[in-house]
Amino acid sequence: MKKKTYKIGINRGNGRIWLEGKLIESCGFTCGAQYNRVDNIEGGEISLFAGTGSRRVTNGNKNGIARAVIELNDATILQRFAGFSRAEVEFRQGMLIYRGAK
């Protein structure tokens, strides 16, 4: 299990958290893979589960090399992480867990 902190950005008035590269791929979130998002309102977390779901990992192309990209970009980001400027992401096999971090 690994943890990393990311800045919560703003895009068109919505909160935005961007993950890319080998770290998410090592957890099973490869280019084009499906995943499911579950918001834990009381716990202040957002969890992503690889394997099934209506969402897909984007195939970002950088200098001709494919890389996995997950972008959370909606109004609920600012609601879930109100008062936080950063999000801590916990990387597990088949799962990513986002939590607010100062």
Image (cartoon, grey):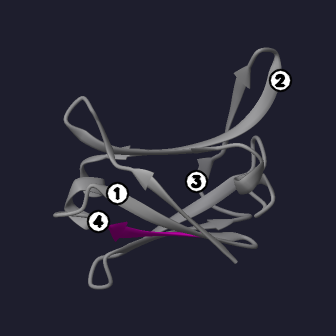
Q: Earlier in the sequence, mark 3 or mark 4?
A: 3
Q: Residues within 10 Å of mark 4 (few under 14, many from 20)?
A: few
Q: Give SS at disc 4.
A: loop
Crowdedness of circle 2 by 10 Å Cα count: few (<14), some, many (20+)? few
Quadrant of the rendered image containing residue 1: bottom right
CB atoms at circles 4 and 1 under 8 Å apart? yes
Foreground: 33 or 89?
89
The disc labelled 3 sits on which kind of residue? Ser
In whole angstroms, how far apart are the C-alphas of marks 2 and 1? 28 Å
Q: Residue at x 34, y 49 (%)?
A: 8
Q: Is residue 23 left or right of residue 88?
A: right
Span of residues in magenta: 96-102
**Residue sitting at the far top:** 63
Check residue 65 in the rendering and tell me which mark sits there, or answer none.
2
Residue corresponding to mark 1? 86
Between disc 3 and disc 1, whose residue precedes? 3
